[in-house]
């Protein structure tokens, strides 16, 4: 049994309505990201820190902490040799890889500021980031992206004469080019840059991938990055600080969620791996064998829906759905004083042999935990995964907190909550129900944006998260929705769309859902179909092949969605229920700009894009009931 946080930090608690977590150790002035890496090298110089995927096959090449430190020093020397001055910004626009982590650590080692850019960002977004962060060097994944950046840099230079941005690409030997520039730079100069840093210096400017407005640059200090990393691995030590800890990153490192877990891997004693292509994720999970995985809720939904679809029809499908119900019932029973009954334990053992083992094997042979973040997982999926033997530690955080504000503990996991605050954070509920946060993880300002900074904090210095939630008597936090997404119907009913969207996305046919109805007489929804799941669903239901456009009007598809909506509505009152919906013929994706890189729906943009569809819903049924 893990001792979890109790061994070093005491227990989280709720004091006067504020959820409080103790801090294991307050960061010292010398705590920086280069210090964090140097500490790891000093502790375990010849133990493996990173495993790199080999060019051929599914083998992994071990890189010790000492060897990685030498690679970092060479690249840092090159950055200095290129003329970059301490405090200047370097951007990375590349996929998740060893090179990304190498560049990130080298940028910090050279006393520079890293600026992640998503590979999916538009030229306009790139131009804004280059200008706002005054970026001097950009390393891209490919020559194609390099050309996009050069175009954005030219536009930036046109409005800011004298601004010069150098662009390199990894597929054209960017790392070798940088290292070559550092041939005459002594290691002492690199060390001097690292040692000149303090915990209050800026480590990175991370631009929000939010669902509305122009992205804001969140300044993350070394105090946040190194302090949270050092404290974080001691918060849940058996999961994060063991030599057996293995993490395979596949989410974008431009996102604060994956970025923080990269820091945890360096701060701990385990091994970090990268896989840039989700098409090879399953074999990579098998080959790398992580001890825990990180995922966003949509990935967990996809795994569940794929298992349901693969079950086909008839006896196999009935067996899978019976096993799913058993898993959920078993998990719920774990939270009772009596625990699962003898009959439920027996059914669970049978279901494990028939179904659960196969699903667990998809995550690799060693995976026991999954850390879920980036959006609400939902109780249904949380209980399902715990019921099949995978411990889901759902957490909560924002770009402005770099790491988790709160996360469930391995020793006390309340499904449906995001756990207690971690690492010295404190959470309270404001007068309007909005969660407010203060503590080690909270940023201090938006880059070049004092107005937004002022608006983000209360008069007494607590960060306004924009999320609505509650805190229980133990200090566990529950999220009920986004403040700006709360729907108020014409009848005055407050409706949080999360629970409806979560339940409806649980159907194998459904990819995305947007629940709407603000100021309208009733709730409705826009639904997109999952083109990956559709072919198997059609086979299972003895229907001919058809594309998403044809399926969107097919009577049997619509009948299945009608039933899914009816099941969804059982979770809410009639006034909150979905009265009608429309099936769209194209999905929400990053490529069309309707999803953020963390797979959140850009609600306002979807509503703008499909304004005519929404108008049609309410014009043809305007006299619906108002409750």
Image (spheres, helix red, strand yellow):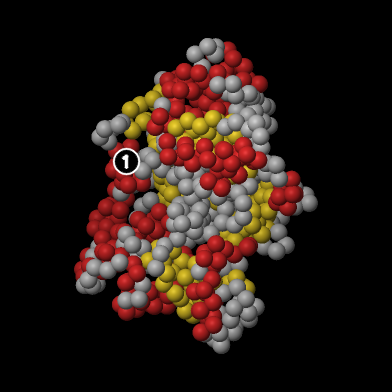
Which x, y percent locates residue 584? 42, 69
Quick one: 338 or 578, which is closer to the camera?
578
Quadrant of image for the N terminus: top left
In the image, residue 561 above or below residue 405: below
Determine which residue is flagged by label 1.
284
In the image, residue 58 above or below residue 587: above
Residue 97 appears anywhere in the view:
yes
Which quadrant of the structure image shows residue 116?
Answer: top right
Quadrant of image for the C terminus: bottom right
Work out which residue is located at the far right of the displayed protein and give it: 459
Left or right? Give the position of 571 relative to 201: left
Quick one: 356 or 608, which is closer to the camera?
608
Left or right? Give the position of 417 relative to 460: left
In the image, residue 557 above or below residue 76: below
Which x, y percent locates residue 456? 70, 51
Which x, y percent locates residue 404? 56, 46
Quick one: 184 or 419, which is closer to the camera?
184
Left or right? Give the position of 335 relative to 464: left
Quick one: 580 or 61, which is closer to the camera?
580
Which x, y percent locates residue 492? 65, 78
Secondary structure found at label 1: helix
Name the residue located 63 percent from the left edge and 62 percent from the top edge. Answer: 483
Left or right? Give the position of 345 relative to 455: left
Task: Estimate how packed mark 1 is, as few (under 14), some (14 to 19) or many (20 or more) residues with alpha carbons within 10 Å.
Answer: many
Name the residue located 31 percent from the left edge and 44 percent from the top edge. Answer: 280
Name the residue located 54 percent from the left edge and 35 percent from the top edge. Answer: 91
């Amino acid at each position: 049994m893990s001792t979890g946080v109790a061994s070093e930090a005491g227990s989280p608690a709720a004091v006067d309505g504020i959820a409080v977590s103790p801090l294991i150790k307050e960061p010292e002035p010398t705590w920086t990201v280069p210090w964090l890496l140097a500490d790891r090298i000093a502790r375990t110089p010849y133990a493996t820190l990173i495993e790199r995927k080999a060019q051929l096959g599914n083998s992994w090449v071990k890189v010790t902490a000492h060897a990685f430190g030498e690679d970092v020093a060479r690249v840092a020397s090159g950055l200095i040799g290129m003329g970059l001055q301490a405090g200047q910004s370097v951007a990375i626009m590349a996929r998740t890889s060893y090179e990304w982590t190498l560049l990130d650590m080298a940028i910090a080692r050279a006393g520079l500021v890293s600026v992640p850019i998503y590979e999916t960002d538009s030229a306009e977004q790139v131009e804004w980031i280059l200008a706002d962060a005054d970026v001097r060097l950009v390393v891209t994944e490919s020559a194609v992206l390099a050309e996009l950046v050069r175009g954005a840099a030219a536009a930036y230079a046109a409005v800011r004469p004298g601004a010069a941005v150098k662009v390199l690409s990894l597929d054209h030997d960017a790392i070798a080019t940088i290292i070559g520039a550092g041939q005459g730079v002594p290691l002492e100069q690199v060390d001097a840059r690292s040692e000149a840093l303090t915990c209050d210096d800026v480590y990175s400017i991370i631009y929000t991938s939010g669902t509305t407005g122009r992205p804001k640059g969140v300044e993350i200090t070394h105090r946040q990055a190194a302090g949270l990393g050092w404290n974080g691995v001691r918060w849940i030590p058996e999961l994060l600080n063991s030599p057996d800890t293995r993490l395979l990153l596949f989410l974008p490192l431009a996102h604060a969620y994956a970025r923080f877990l990269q820091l945890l891997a360096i701060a701990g004693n385990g091994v970090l791996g990268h896989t840039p292509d989700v098409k090879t994720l399953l074999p990579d999970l098998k080959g790398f064998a992580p001890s825990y995985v990180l995922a966003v809720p949509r990935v967990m939904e996809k795994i569940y829906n794929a298992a349901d679809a693969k079950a086909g029809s008839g006896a196999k499908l009935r067996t899978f759905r019976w096993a799913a119900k058993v898993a959920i019932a078993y998990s719920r029973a774990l939270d009772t004083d009596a625990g699962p009954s003898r009959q439920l334990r027996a059914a669970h053992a049978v279901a494990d042999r028939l179904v659960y083992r196969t699903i667990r094997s998809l995550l690799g042979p060693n995976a026991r935990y999954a850390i879920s973040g980036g959006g609400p997982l939902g109780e249904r999926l949380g209980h399902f995964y715990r019921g099949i033997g995978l411990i889901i530690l759902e957490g909560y955080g924002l770009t402005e907190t770099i790491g988790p504000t709160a996360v469930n503990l391995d020793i006390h996991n309340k499904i449906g909550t995001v756990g207690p605050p971690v690492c010295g954070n404190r959470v309270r509920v404001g007068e309007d129900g909005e969660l407010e946060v203060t503590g080690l993880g909270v940023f201090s300002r938006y880059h070049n944006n004092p107005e937004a900074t002022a608006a983000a904090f209360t008069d007494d210095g607590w960060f306004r998260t924009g999320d609505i939630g509650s805190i229980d008597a133990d200090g566990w936090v529950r999220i009920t929705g986004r403040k700006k997404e709360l729907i108020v119907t014409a009848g005055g009913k407050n409706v949080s769309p999360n629970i409806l969207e979560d339940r409806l996305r649980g159907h194998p046919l459904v990819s995305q859902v947007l629940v709407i109805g603000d100021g309208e007489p009733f709730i409705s929804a826009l639904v997109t179909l999952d083109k990956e799941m559709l072919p198997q669903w059609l086979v299972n239901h003895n229907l001919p092949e058809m594309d998403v456009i044809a399926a969107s009007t097919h009577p049997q598809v619509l009948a299945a969605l009608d039933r899914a909506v009816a099941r969804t509505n059982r979770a809410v009152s009639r006034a909150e229920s979905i009265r009608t919906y429309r099936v769209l013929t194209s999905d929400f994706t990053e490529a069309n700009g309707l999803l953020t890189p963390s797979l959140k729906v850009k609600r306002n943009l979807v509503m703008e894009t499909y304004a005519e569809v929404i108008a049609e819903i309410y014009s043809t049924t305007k006299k619906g009931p108002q409750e």
